[in-house]
Image (spheres, rainbow, N blue to C red):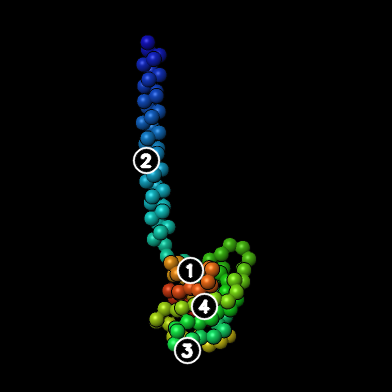
């Protein structure tokens, strides 16, 4: 009889412990997801300006690749992209042949069309 009661108590303690562990894991993963979702504009790319179109507010950038801090491993050339800089950027400073580094607004990153809206652009590096 004592063994049955002890076994019953062990089962109850095990269920309570499992419930506590599951609750702690759920809270931690939700916090991690919120933290990751709050991080925006972390991808930086670099390339060489081919042309600028002031009327459209865009520039064509060749040899686009992730910067060293945004990649692991060797750089990969992703070709030519159409970049829309922020309104605060002066397109006249992006003359053909100059190197630009741009921070990607992640919600505009369209790999299929090779178009991106940049949240920040810097000339030279």
Q: Earlier in the sequence, mark 3 or mark 1?
A: 3
Q: Earlier in the sequence, mark 4 or mark 2?
A: 2
Which residue carries the number 3 mark? 92
Which residue carries the number 2 mark? 23
Question: What is the crowding at mark 2: few (fewer than 14 residues within 10 Å), some, or many (at least 20)?
Answer: few
Q: Earlier in the sequence, mark 4 or mark 3?
A: 4
Which label was assigned to residue 82?
A: 4
Q: Earlier in the sequence, mark 2 or mark 3?
A: 2
In front of the other: label 3 or label 1?
1
The image shows residue 100, relative to residue 9, as above or below, that is: below
* Residue at x 38% of width, y 42% of height: 24
* Residue at x 38% of width, y 51% of height: 31
Q: Earlier in the sequence, mark 2 or mark 1?
A: 2
Which residue carries the number 1 mark? 109
Instruction: Kindly state the secondary structure of the residue where label 4 is placed.
Output: strand
Question: What is the crowding at mark 3: few (fewer than 14 residues within 10 Å), some, or many (at least 20)?
Answer: few
Residue 70, given in percent of the width and then of the height, sits at 53, 66
For the residues labelled 4 and 3, the Cα–Cα distance comes to 16 Å
Which label was assigned to residue 79?
A: none
């Amino acid at each position: 009889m004592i063994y049955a009661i002890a076994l019953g108590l062990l089962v109850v303690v095990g269920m309570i412990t499992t419930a506590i562990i599951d609750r702690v894991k759920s809270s931690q993963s939700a916090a991690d997801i919120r933290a990751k979702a709050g991080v925006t504009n972390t991808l930086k790319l670099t390339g060489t300006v081919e042309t600028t179109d002031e009327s459209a507010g865009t520039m064509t950038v060749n040899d686009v690749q992730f910067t060293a801090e945004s990649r692991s491993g060797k750089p990969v050339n992703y070709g030519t992209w159409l970049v829309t800089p922020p309104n605060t950027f002066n397109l006249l400073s992006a003359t053909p042949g100059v190197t630009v580094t741009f921070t990607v607004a992640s919600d505009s990153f369209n790999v299929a069309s090779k178009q991106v809206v940049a949240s920040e652009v810097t000339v030279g590096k």
